[in-house]
Image: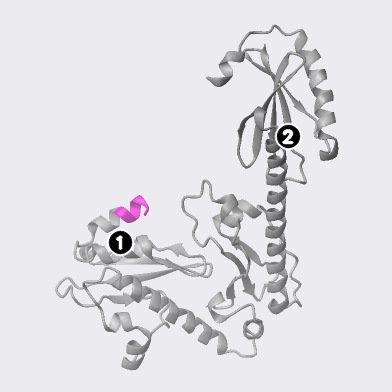
Amino acid sequence: MSSESFGILSDISSYFRPFIQNVLQELKLGLCKTKVDLEKIPGGFDGADTQFRLVLPYCSKKLKWEVIFDAATPWFAPDFRFDDESFLSSVDEDLLEEKLGSLAKWNENDPEALSKVISELVTLYRNHQIKKLSEDESSRAYFEYTALLGDALTSESDIEVWVGGHVVEFLIKLNIDVTRLPELYNDGIDENPGIDTALLLVRYPNSTNAELILSPLLTKSLGNITLPLMHQSGVLMDYVPMVTELLNNKIHDILKAEKFKRELLVQFIVKYEGAVLEHDSNCAAFLFETHNFHWILHIEVGENFPENLPVLTLRSVYHCDKGKPKSKILPSCPYNSFEEYISQQVEIFKNECIGTPATNQLVNIDN
């Protein structure tokens, strides 16, 4: 929760505060699964303790819906004011009972009551946008939407629709397999909304400017992705599977490279078990002695492996350069001649160190 939202929340009556806290902390909406934000209603200072504005993610938009409680009857459900005047402009009792059950049966003792109502309202809003889209069945956007739903990989729940004056937006969830990625890329991501989410944002009539929206996990693991060009004559029912396959192939390559990397490190760790100083999933360090010359081999395997070969560094145990252990980064070498290459490089490195004053610091290795 942002400091601004916390300040607004503190001004709201303590009777209604639990509802809003649950919305801000627990409710995640839209295909992005982004948290809801809170704003003050401009000019509504007299009712600041009972009125506020929720900022809700939808497509590429931020819906701004005002929530108004009544301090005189705090056990009643709140009223709503929407930024789209056409949304719920006429509501009958049957719709209220069927589609907004949490509002019709408002429970003032349930902290999740407002979150449930907002979730139901967003579902109704999505249906409202689809209805607006279907009002022009001859449009390109309507054709694309109905054709895409004919694809077994895409369902109605995978698409958010927004219809503006001259623009139609589709936010489409791509069916990708990320079941093993959290094993590799969960470090350093405290909040990762929509861990499995890859979304495609397409606007009509200018559909050639498609945008790829990735969750933090996928952004970190996949890096920069260049989308294939979507021609003006192309259709979503072909383009969405193409992008989906591109991402799944990228994930497959990452997992394959990770497996290769781990097998490479394990190979060295097992072979030189008695010389291991430290190791993790990306690097390992070994202590060796060659003709009374003690040296450390550090192997670092980067994220772009195997395109980029491992970085090999030699360090002398005794010899220093400007107060630091003398070291040398080696040119990369093929795996099939690794040991021969290292032996040659160690001999060269040893001769380079002979002219450097040696200090008896071997005892410090275990400190």
Q: What residue lies at 25% left-to-right and 79% top-to-bottom?
A: 106
Give the label, 2 or 1, closer to the camera: 2
Residue 69: image quadrant is bottom left
Q: Magenta span covers which residues?
A: 1-6
Q: Which residue is mark 2?
A: 311
Q: Is residue 247 visible?
A: yes
Q: Secondary structure at mark 1?
A: helix
Q: Secondary structure at mark 2?
A: strand
Which image quarter is the N terminus in?
A: bottom left
**Residue at point 85%, 35% (across, down):** 337
Residue 90 lies, in percent from the top left, at: 36, 89
Q: Amino acid at mark 1?
A: Gln
Residue for point 25% across, 63% down: 18
Residue 307's disc is none
Residue 202 picture location, percent across and down = 63, 71
Q: Which mark is residue 21?
A: 1
